[in-house]
Each structure stands twice: as structure tokens, then as C-alpha cells.
Image: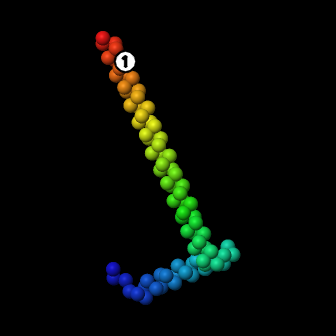
Amino acid sequence: MNTSVSTVQSGVNSIQSAIQTVGSQVGLSGAQVINSIQQGNAQLSQQLCKCCCDNQLAIVNQTNALQSQAAANHASAQLQRA
């Protein structure tokens, strides 16, 4: 990857410093900031899953409605020919 251990360590230290800075600004410890981020990510994941399921259900319902209408149109056309 062409990255030295010291570069990675420097990046980790910068992240730790940023978390502590945010924590001090909002009155939380670094661990509390990390927990808040994780809880936010979990909530976001739950919302995305719900949205995905809702969209899938809406697509299935719309497809069923279209298929029903197509079948009704086909049956009607068959009756008109007879």
C-alpha cells in the first residue's frame, strides 16, 4: 500500500484528537462521542432498511395491480372478439 506505520499512526492520532475536540465542544467524553456516532449509524441503518422494505412492497403492489389490469384488459378483448 506504500504507507508507513508512522503515517497510519499519525492518522489515528488525528482522528482521536478530532473526537476529543468534538467531545469537549459538546461536553462528552471521546467514548461518548464514539457511542453517539455508532448509535446514529445504527438508526440510519434501520431507517434505510425500512425504506428499502417499503419500496419493495410498493413495487410488488404496483406490479400486481398492473398484472391484474392487463389480465382484465385481455379478458375484455377476448369477450369482444367472441
Q: Is residue 37 above or below residue 12?
A: above
For the rendered model, the colour scheme is rainbow
Residue at the extreme bottom: 6
- How far from the left and from the top, in percent, is residue 15? 52, 79
Residue 53 higher or lower than 80, as above or below = below
Judged from this view, the residue extending furthest toward the left is: 81
**From this viewpoint, is residue 28 visible?**
yes
Residue 22 visible here: no
Q: Residue at x 47, y 85 (%)?
A: 10
Count of numbered labels shown in the rendering: 1
The spot of residue 67 in percent (x, y) is 38, 31
Q: Nearer the viewer, residue 82 or 34?
A: 82
* Left or right: 82 in relation to 69: left
Q: Residue at x 50, y 55 (%)?
A: 48
Q: Return the x and y of residue 44 as percentages of the image width and height.
A: 54, 59
Q: What type is the residue that disc 1 sits on?
A: Ser
Residue 56 position by quadrant:
top left
Q: Quadrant of residue 40?
A: bottom right
Quadrant in the rendering for residue 37:
bottom right
Q: Residue at x 47, y 41 (%)?
A: 58
Q: Which residue, given by chain and number where applicable, does mark 1 sit on?
A: 76
Vertical order, 61 against 43 (above or below): above
Quadrant showing the C terminus = top left
Q: Residue at x 55, y 81 (%)?
A: 16
Q: Tell which residue pokes out farthest to the top in this image.
A: 82
Judged from the image, the secondary structure of the residue bearing numbered disc 1 is helix
Q: Quadrant of the N terminus?
A: bottom left
Local packing at callout 1 (Cα closer than 10 Å; few below 14, some 14-19, many 20+) is: few
Image location of residue 21, percent across then percent down: 62, 78
